[in-house]
């Protein structure tokens, strides 16, 4: 027999079930709403993060671009702008002219640096030019004094007897060396150096004149049968260059070793070879020597006090288009070969001295 549920109880159960269903629906609705809110929030956060990353990338790219632009401008300032300004200043341009003609950097800081450097360099160039002019002036005075002393000594050599002739010749030789040093200073400072002859000078006289200007003249042996002569306007420069090379050969070989000078006429000019019996030059020393006498412009700031001779040779070689090269000597030391170009050569019978 089945028990019957009272009608009141059935109503209560139904109401409870209904309330439970409503509660479940409300809960589900709230959960769904919260899920949507969370998803929306996550989407907004993701979008914000993406925007932040995009802006950070843009800022980084902009910073990199600016740094690269600054580096490029600094490199151009160092590699192009400043060297161009220095070149114009050394050629005599005023700082205002240079600043007006050389494009300044776009950046304000670099532009200020450039202007400051240009003015400092201009000041330095004025000081350098003044020092060079003073050295050239001093060299000119010593040259004039040496020339006058040589003239007096040679006049005395003709007047006095043999008892004093040896002393006079020694003074003559010492004065000639002093004159060569003054000529070297004049060459390095761009001043006029030595005398200019109106007539060609025969090769024998050029060689003897070069030998007479060095202290170790007694160790030099000349082997020449050349009848060629050097044009008067270039004879002094050629003589001076050969004297410096002979002096260099004698200085870097033992005092008992002779220095031999050979002359050969070719279709390209006259070749003078100077050989010593000293030590063979190392590759580094050979490279320095070749550079010193090359066609490169002279930079006085890179000269040491003991390497002036080859710098003088380089200046004279550039002036007279001489070609100077070094090689091992057959005598065990170093040989230097000087080509005097055909345009400087005058052949016998053309009123040479």
Image (tube, rainbow, N blue to C red):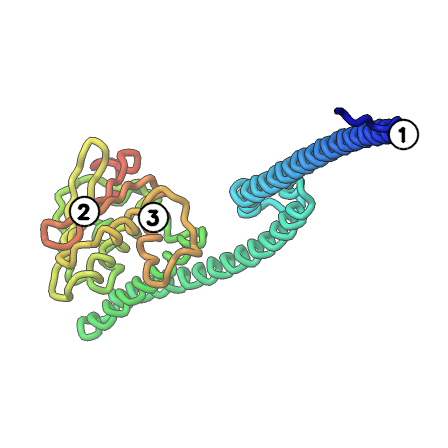
Observer able to see residue 101: no
162 shown above or below 204: below
Q: Which mark is residue 327?
A: 2
Q: Is residue 100 above or below residue 124?
A: above
- Frontmost of labels 1 and 3 is 1
Q: Which residue is mark 3?
A: 314
Residue 204 position within the rendered picture, expressed as x and y whole percent measured from the top left: 19, 48
| Residue in the picture at 20% in, 31% down | 267
Q: Is residue 74 visible?
A: yes
* Residue farthest toward the front in the current orientation of the protein: 1
Q: Residues within 10 Å of mark 3 (few under 14, many from 20)?
A: many
Q: Quadrant of residue 39?
A: top right
Judging depth in this view, the residue of 243 and 129 nearest the camera is 129
SS at mark 3 in the image? helix
Of the two numbered discs 3 and 2 on the same chain, state the one appearing first in sequence: 3
Residue 188: name its quadrant.
bottom left
Q: Are marks 2 and 1 in contact (CB under 8 Å)?
A: no
Q: CA distance from mark 3 to mark 2?
A: 17 Å
Q: Position of residue 237 (x, y in %)?
A: 33, 48
Nearer the observer: mark 2 or 1; the answer is 1
Location of residue 66 in the rendering, given as x and y in whole percent from the top left corner: 63, 40
Residue furthest right as drawn: 8
Q: Residue at x 44, y 56 (%)?
A: 301
Residue 169 relative to residue 313: left or right: left
11 relative to 312, above or below? above
Give the secondary structure at mark 2.
Answer: strand
Q: Is residue 16 above or below residue 282?
A: above
Kindly identify which residue carries mark 1: 8
Counting residues from the start of the chain, the first of labels 1 and 3 encountered is 1
| Relative horizontal placement of residue 216, taking residue 303 as reference (left or right) | left
Residue 184, given in percent of the width and then of the height, sits at 37, 57
Residues at circles 3 and 2 in contact by the CB criterion of under 8 Å: no
């Amino acid at each position: 027999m089945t028990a019957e549920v009272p009608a009141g109880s059935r109503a209560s159960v139904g109401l409870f079930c209904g309330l439970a269903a409503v509660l479940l629906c409300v809960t589900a609705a709230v959960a769904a709403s919260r899920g949507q809110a969370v998803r929306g929030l996550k989407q907004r956060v993701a979008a914000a993060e993406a925007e932040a990353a995009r802006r950070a990338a843009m800022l980084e790219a902009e910073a990199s671009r600016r740094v690269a632009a600054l580096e490029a401008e600094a490199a151009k300032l160092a590699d192009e702008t400043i060297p161009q300004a220095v070149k114009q200043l050394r050629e005599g341009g005023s700082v205002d002219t240079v600043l007006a003609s050389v494009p300044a950097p776009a950046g304000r800081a670099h532009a200020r640096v450039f202007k400051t450097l240009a003015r400092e360099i201009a000041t330095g160039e004025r000081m350098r030019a003044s020092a060079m002019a003073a050295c050239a002036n001093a060299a000119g005075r010593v040259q004039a004094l040496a020339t006058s002393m040589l003239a007096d000594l040679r006049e005395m050599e003709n007047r006095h007897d043999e008892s004093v002739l040896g002393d006079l010749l020694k003074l003559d030789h010492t004065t000639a060396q002093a004159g060569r040093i003054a000529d070297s200073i004049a060459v390095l400072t761009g001043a006029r150096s030595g005398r200019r002859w109106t007539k060609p000078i025969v090769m024998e006289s050029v060689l003897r004149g070069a030998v007479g200007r060095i202290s170790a003249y007694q160790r030099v042996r000349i082997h020449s049968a050349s009848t060629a002569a050097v044009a008067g306007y270039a004879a002094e420069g050629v003589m001076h260059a050969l004297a410096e090379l002979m002096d260099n050969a004698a200085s870097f070989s033992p005092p008992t070793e002779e220095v031999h000078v050979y002359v050969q006429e070719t279709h390209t000019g006259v070749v003078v070879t100077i050989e010593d019996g000293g030590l063979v030059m190392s590759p580094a020393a050979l490279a320095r020597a070749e550079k010193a006498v090359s066609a490169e412009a002279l930079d006085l700031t890179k000269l040491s006090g003991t390497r002036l001779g080859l710098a003088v040779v380089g200046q004279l070689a550039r002036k007279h288009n001489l070609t100077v090269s070094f090689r091992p000597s057959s005598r065990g030391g170093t040989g230097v070969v000087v080509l005097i170009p055909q345009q400087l050569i005058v052949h016998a019978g053309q009123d040479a001295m």
